[in-house]
Image: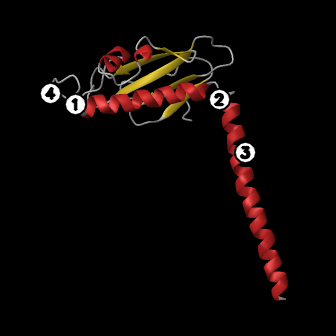
């Protein structure tokens, strides 16, 4: 009787492990169906680097204006050596990046978008001040003045 119980527990453990691994594979496949091939991974990495730069700009008051606000553009982030100089023009890894801050709340709200230079087969990505990454296969990710978006979150 004891041996049967242990065998059942052993098989249950194996099934749970396979389920977890299979579940992870299922999520990965689902994400690739949504986002397509891994074209967006470098674009998302660039957006995260921009997010880090925006945090450093704001918290360090890099423009020394006495207001903890976000940078209005990539050029400003590059001027303060917070991003690579070659990213200042907005081009990186086949994507064109753009940074905007809210006209009504520049101290709290910013967002960045990445649009592919060659759209077919690539998705559009965006990231807001909360670190949420958005995706749209059909056109640029759009943001409201409060940093929210109607596009799907990755």
Residue at mark 1 to residue at mark 3: CA–CA distance: 42 Å
Q: Is residue 143 visible?
A: no
Q: CA distance from mark 4 to mark 2?
A: 41 Å
Q: Residues within 10 Å of mark 2 (few under 14, many from 20)?
A: many
Q: Nearer the viewer, residue 117 or 87?
A: 87
Q: Position of residue 21 (x, y in %)?
A: 72, 53
Kindly indicate the quadrant of the structure image that contains residue 35.
top right
Sequence order check: which comes first, mark 2 or mark 3? 3
Q: Give the structural element (helix, strand or loop) at label 2.
A: helix
Mark number, residue 68: 1
Q: Relative to residue 111, is residue 68 drawn left or right?
A: left
SS category of the residue bearing label 3: helix
Q: Nearer the viewer, residue 114 or 138?
A: 114
Q: Which mark is residue 35?
A: 2
Please state which of residues 42 and 150 is positioned toward the viewer in this rendering: 42
Report helix, strand or loop for mark 4.
Answer: loop
Sequence-first tag of 3 and 4? 3
């Amino acid at each position: 009787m004891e041996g049967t119980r242990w065998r059942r527990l052993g098989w249950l453990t194996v099934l749970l492990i396979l389920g977890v691994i299979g579940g992870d594979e299922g999520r990965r496949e689902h994400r690739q169906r949504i986002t397509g091939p891994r074209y967006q991974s470098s674009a998302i990495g660039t957006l995260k680097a921009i997010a880090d730069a925006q945090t450093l700009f704001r918290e360090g008051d890099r423009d020394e204006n006495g207001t903890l606000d976000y940078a209005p553009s990539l050029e400003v982030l590059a001027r303060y050596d917070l991003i690579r100089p070659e990213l200042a023009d907005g081009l990186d890894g086949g994507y064109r990046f753009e940074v905007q801050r809210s006209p009504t709340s520049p101290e709290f709200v910013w967002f960045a978008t990445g649009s592919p230079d060659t759209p077919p087969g690539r998705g559009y990505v965006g990231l807001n001040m909360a670190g949420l990454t958005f995706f749209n296969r059909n056109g640029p990710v759009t943001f409201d003045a409060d940093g929210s978006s109607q596009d799907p979150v990755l």
